[in-house]
């Protein structure tokens, strides 16, 4: 009985990564390794103002004093930071004015990924910024957005065109001293997306960034900054893929969100970096710092993530709830199959009065995958009337994978109401047989059951992304049932 | 429709069904009755293809094909339906989504296009009415939070949706009050045609007050020890299973 269940699970969760192609495109690289000259070189290539170079150098000098964090429930092989290439850019005109100027090979790449840069997105009403290796390739819809005063552009462009905004907010949520990977990112980040929603504006379309690592031996360090002024709203989507390569590649991004009075920011991620092969060879190391601050009263930041990719994921999208009555949300589905490892969760820091947070985390482990939830709920002394609800579920497919939960609670104000619920379950053979008896094969059955399990989170994604995420969940577990 | 010859079924090496012969033709309703532990549910699950049950001997043909070689999903797609004694819950999967997937898998198998959303919803409404399943239940997750009676009614609803050639109802009456029993029986009667067949597995005679079988078989210690017309059920009701036991031992 156990055997047949095992077999079903392993069959369903063993398929291949579908985005593993590479693009043959001329790439401009700088030498591997990291030192102050390299940082100056990156800054110079991007024609950055002096303040940025200073920011980078300070970060680099601080980073040199730090060590890689070891507290996560992850087995991380040593990383040689001098072997990594910190800047790679597809050779093409730096600022394409129209799609005709974009390298056709690049356009084909994004077509293969299902990211049409043209009409289709226009119909769907999504503005896209595309970051290939280290630089932003193309941002769509800029003019339409500009009419409303919304700024949506690459980080490089923001540094050049809107230096005051960047200077004011960059590093304000994740300081360059924050942690090992955030410091590294601050020193070497090459591009990313910048998004500014002016006061009172409801951004009429989803803003979306697709990240793609293409070049070999390179790291990707993108930096995203979202600022939502008073009474504004924006929904932001992020997708990521990478080619299949035998070596591990480092991805260390930083995302900062600032929400002012009554502002709301929804940030959704479908992370599908190359997870490595069935034997744990290759795959992306995904060490990401994402943090938002609800700076204004009644503001809201909502993180939704579907994490199916990467060999190792180390990621805790967090909310600092500073404004009174502000709301933080974290909805997560994390899948680890084969030899993937994930240590992911959130931090909800309650500082303002009557602040509320919700955490829904759904871990799915298959193969030899190890999945850890790590979450902190902190209530500071003056934060009266705080409410938190945490639900943390684990689903195990097979008996060689693992699920772990590390909840931390620091409550300094006794008016707080904190709830934590946790469950661990398996897909039962009864459930699979029930589906079989209605004409569903094992793969369809497991896909359906897993999607049902994750539904609460998937429902939070914008429609278009939800469909993609559902398929992705099914694909990333193919061959794991058996 | 279904021809069972000298069927032996074991679980963990222990023989439960010890040589059964049974022929079910289109248009017929058969009742299989028997005391607890006689092997009724084993027979039902094994026919549906549950792997833990090992067929040690015998043959089963379904619509002229070797049933035992088919995967459980292919048996279902070819028109064999099992109404479960204990329907399982699938959290987060709505009945609508579940049924849509099931119907379209069946259609794909038959080389048909998926049902359009509007046709599907029309079918849902029609069948909901037929079996008296409250519409709100189909918006919920599969069997999640359903009462015992609702779960059974939901099985009949799924049967109505999939319109199988052969339905095996495994103790569908257990745990039902008399009103629910009537609704379930009513559903079965309405779905009956001259082209399909039903095997009703039950411990009690009372279901057979509402579903009138053409044949009644008594299963005892892994064998069919008596087969007769519907009047056999009444004898069992009156005399209990001891009468059979006395007669066979």
Image: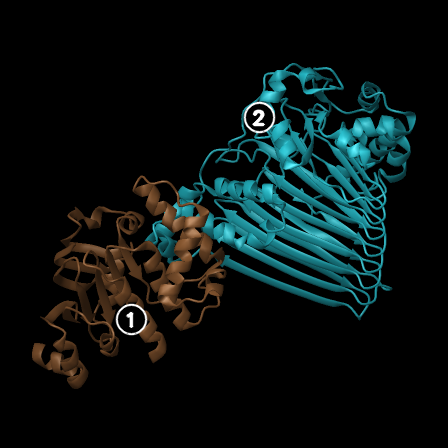
- Across and down, in percent, residue A304 comes to 66, 48
Which color has been applied to chain A in this rendered view? cyan
- Of badges 2 and 1, the one in the foreground is 1
Q: Foreground residue, A6 or A165?
A: A165
Q: Residue tagged by mark 2?
A: A111
Label 1 crowding class (10 Å Cα cut-off): few <14, some 14-19, many 20+?
A: many
Q: Is residue A331 visible in the rendered structure shown here?
A: yes
Label 2: element kind: helix
- Across and down, in percent, residue B101 comes to 41, 49
Q: Residue at x 58, y 27 (%)?
A: A247
Question: Within the image, what quadrant is residue A290 found in?
Answer: top right
Q: Return the residue found at the far bottom.
A: B238
Question: Within the image, what quadrant is residue A248 found in?
Answer: top right
- Chain identifier of the residue bearing label 1 in the image: B
Q: Residue tagged by mark 1?
A: B185
Label 1: element kind: helix
Chain shown brown: that is B
Report, in whole angstroms, how far the alpha carbon at label 2 lies from the one at label 1. 55 Å
């Amino acid at each position: 009985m156990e055997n047949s269940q095992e077999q079903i699970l392993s069959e369903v969760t063993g398929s291949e990564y579908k985005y593993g192609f590479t693009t043959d495109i001329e790439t401009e690289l700088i030498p591997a390794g990291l030192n102050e000259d390299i940082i100056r070189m990156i800054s110079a290539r991007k024609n950055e103002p002096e303040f940025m170079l200073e920011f980078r150098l300070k970060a680099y000098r601080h980073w040199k004093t730090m060590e890689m964090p070891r507290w996560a429930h992850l087995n991380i092989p040593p990383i040689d930071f001098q072997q990594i290439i910190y800047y790679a850019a597809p050779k093409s005109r730096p600022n394409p004015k129209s799609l005709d100027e974009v390298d056709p090979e690049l356009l084909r790449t994004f077509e293969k990924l299902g990211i049409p840069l043209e009409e289709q997105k226009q119909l769907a009403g999504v503005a896209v910024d595309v970051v290939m290796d280290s630089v932003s390739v193309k941002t769509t819809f800029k003019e339409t957005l500009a009419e409303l005063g919304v700024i949506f552009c690459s980080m490089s462009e923001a540094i050049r065109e809107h230096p005051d905004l960047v200077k004011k907010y960059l590093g304000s949520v994740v300081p360059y001293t924050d942690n090992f990977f955030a410091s590294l990112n601050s020193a070497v980040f090459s591009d990313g997306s910048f998004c500014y929603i002016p006061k009172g504006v409801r951004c009429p379309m989803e803003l979306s960034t697709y990240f793609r690592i293409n070049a070999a031996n390179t790291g990707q360090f993108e930096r995203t900054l979202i600022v939502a002024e008073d009474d504004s709203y924006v929904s932001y989507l992020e997708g990521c893929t990478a080619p299949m390569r035998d070596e591990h590649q480092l991805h260390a991004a930083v995302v900062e969100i600032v929400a002012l009075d009554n502002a709301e920011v929804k940030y959704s991620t479908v992370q599908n970096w190359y997870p490595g092969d069935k034997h744990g060879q290759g795959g992306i190391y995904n060490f990401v710092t994402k943090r938002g601050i609800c700076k204004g009263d009644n503001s809201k930041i909502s993180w939704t993530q579907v994490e199916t990719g990467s060999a190792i994921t180390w990621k805790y999208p967090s909310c600092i709830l500073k404004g009174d009555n502000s709301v933080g949300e974290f909805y997560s589905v994390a899948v680890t199959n084969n030899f993937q490892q994930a240590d992911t969760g959130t931090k909800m820091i309650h500082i303002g009065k009557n602040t509320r947070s919700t955490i829904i985390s759904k871990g799915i482990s298959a193969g030899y995958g190890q999945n850890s939830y790590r979450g902190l709920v902190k209530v500071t002394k003056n934060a009266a009337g705080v409410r938190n609800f945490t639900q943390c579920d684990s689903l195990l497919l097979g008996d060689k994978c693992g699920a772990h939960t590390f909840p931390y609670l620091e409550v300094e104000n006794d008016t707080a109401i904190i709830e934590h619920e946790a469950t661990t379950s398996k897909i039962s053979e009864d459930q699979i047989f029930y589906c079989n008896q209605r004409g569903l094969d094992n793969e369809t059955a497991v896909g359906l059951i897993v999607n049902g399990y994750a539904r609460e989170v998937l429902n939070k994604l914008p429609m278009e992304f939800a469909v993609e995420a559902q398929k992705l969940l099914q694909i990333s577990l193919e061959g794991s049932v058996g | 429709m279904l021809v069972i010859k000298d069927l032996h079924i074991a679980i963990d090496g222990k023989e439960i069904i010890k040589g059964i012969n049974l022929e079910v033709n289109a248009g017929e309703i058969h009742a299989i009755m028997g005391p607890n532990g006689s092997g009724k549910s084993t027979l039902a699950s094994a026919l549906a293809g549950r792997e833990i049950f090992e067929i040690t001997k015998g043959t089963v043909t379904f619509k002229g094909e070797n049933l035992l070689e088919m995967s459980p999903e292919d048996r279902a797609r070819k028109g064999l339906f099992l109404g479960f004694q204990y329907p399982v819950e699938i959290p987060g999967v709505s009945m609508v989504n579940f049924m849509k997937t099931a119907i379209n898998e069946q259609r794909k198998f038959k080389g048909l296009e998926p049902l359009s959303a509007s046709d599907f919803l029309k079918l849902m409404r029609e069948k909901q009415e037929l079996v008296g399943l409250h519409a709100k239940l189909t918006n919920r997750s599969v069997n999640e939070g359903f009462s015992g009676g609702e779960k059974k009614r939901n099985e009949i609803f799924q049967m109505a949706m999939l319109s199988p050639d052969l339905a095996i109802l495994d103790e569908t009456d257990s745990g039902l009050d008399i009103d629910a029993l009537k609704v379930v029986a009513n559903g079965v009667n309405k779905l009956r045609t001259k082209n399909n067949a039903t095997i009703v597995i039950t411990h009690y005679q009372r279901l057979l007050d509402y579903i009138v079988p053409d044949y009644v078989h008594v299963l005892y210690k892994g064998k069919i020890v008596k087969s007769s017309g519907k009047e056999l059920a009444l004898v069992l009701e009156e005399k209990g299973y001891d009468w059979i036991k006395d007669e066979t031992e």
